[in-house]
Amino acid sequence: MSKPIKVQILERARALIEDQRCWCRGDLGRDAMDVSVGPIDSNAERRCALGALVAAAYEFTNDLHLAHDLAMTAMRPFVGATALTHINDTEGHAAVLTLFDIAIERYQEGRANA
């Protein structure tokens, strides 16, 4: 049986920012010159947690509107997009990865609506 789309998006988003050098605070994405870019921009080298979710969802859907919708709901019921951004910017990289791990685990255990 294939994994639910939200689990696939969460796993891919986590992989995009697993290396701390690929993660950022304060913007959805940044390029090599540390300039703010969109998370699906071909020049994006770093992304925040939400930006990684958008980029991952876009890889699956190739539809920016749908990618944004999926990204905004991928962490629910654990945390909303605003709280995710706050955790990203204040608690840091390790906290974000832990949150992704918890969400993935709970979806896989069936303790969340996928």
Image: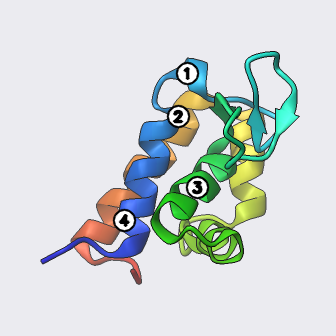
Residue 101 drawn above or below residue 83: above
The foreground one among 45 and 100 is 45
User: Residue tagged by mark 2?
Assistant: 17
**Looking at the picture, which amino acid does disc 1 mark?**
Gln
Residue 4 drawn above or below residue 37: below
* Alpha carbon distance from label 2 to label 4: 16 Å
**Which label sits on residue 53?**
3
Q: What x and y, as percent, mark residue 9?
A: 45, 61
Q: Upstream in the sequence, badge 3 or badge 4?
A: 4
Q: Residue at 55% of width from left, 21% of height from top?
A: 20
Quarter of the image where the C terminus is located: bottom left
Q: Upstream in the sequence, badge 1 or badge 3?
A: 1
- Locate residue 105: give its quadrant: bottom left
Q: What x and y, as percent, mark residue 108?
A: 25, 67
**Quick one: label 1, few (<14), some, or many (20+) residues within 10 Å?**
some
**Which label sits on residue 43?**
none
**Looking at the picture, which amino acid does disc 4 mark?**
Val
